[in-house]
Image: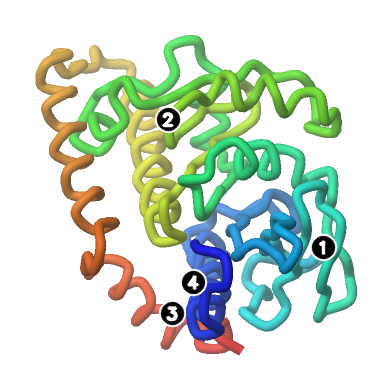
Amino acid sequence: MPDGAPADTVTQLRRDLAAAYRLIAHFGMDDGIYTHISARLPDGPGGEKRFLLNPYGLRFDEVTAANLVTVDETGAVVDDPYGAGVNAAGFTIHSAVHMARHDAVCVLHTHTVAGVAVSSIKEGLLPLNQWSAQFFNRIAFHDYEGIALNLEERERIVADLGEKQVMLLRNHGTLLLGRSVAEAVKLALNLERSCKAQVAALGMGQTPIVLPDDVAEHTAGQYQKMYDKMEGAGGKDPEWDAFLRMLETAAPGYKG
């Protein structure tokens, strides 16, 4: 997002981010008051980097466009409408990614049962179906170092992530980057159902059919073209629009 973006652009970003929190809660992918979804704001008047984050202590289903907190790259609070501050330690991962990856408007981190399960096995996500083939050769890995309180870990996270948009944090959870909030949410939802399908398939006690590499790569490329088109200038995103319509009924207060 360019510096000096118009107010309506910032308003839309806040609404999209609030929608992301509500959607992750709606699909049961939140973890109490923990984990975060962050979004990059336009730079401040002095060039300072600024991001939106959830107020500490609120559940994801309580986040609104109005109560999102503005923080700088260290997690220090710049603007706090709700007055509860943020979990600065929880912003460690997000700040590292935002500062290194300027293509990432949104960074989304989850601790779901399925995501943690798949992150806890050596093989990671297998190309067992069309959903998981989307991520073939497109997942980075970062080994667990304990709760992410050490700022020195940020460099290792960034190095392990490279240019990818998806990371399995070993024994911990998942990390998704989006060129928009919509892209980050869709990647998270698709990764989650891929992980659920893998847990279910391997739990059947039968022999899983792993897609051939060429088929998996072809499928991943098809997904990538679709995402690139929607993220392109003026690209329409009917899937995101459908999610927002759902929230008008399921959580209409998110815009407030």
SS class of the residue under badge 1? loop
Mark toward the start of the polypeptide (3 vs 4) = 4
The residue tagged 2 is 164
> Which residue shows up at 55% across the image and 81% down it?
11
Give the number of the mark in front: 2 or 3: 2
The residue tagged 3 is 247
Mark seen at residue 56: 1
Splitting the image into 4 quarters, where does residue 237 fall? Answer: bottom left
Callouts 2 and 1 close, C-beta under 8 Å: no
Give the number of the mark in front: 2 or 1: 2
Q: Depth check: give the residue in front, 47 or 193.
A: 47
SS class of the residue under badge 2? loop
Splitting the image into 4 quarters, where does residue 150 fall? Answer: top right
Q: Amino acid at mark 1?
A: Tyr
Q: CA distance from mark 2 to mark 1?
A: 29 Å
Q: CA distance from mark 3 to mark 4?
A: 11 Å
SS class of the residue under badge 4? helix
SS class of the residue under badge 3? helix
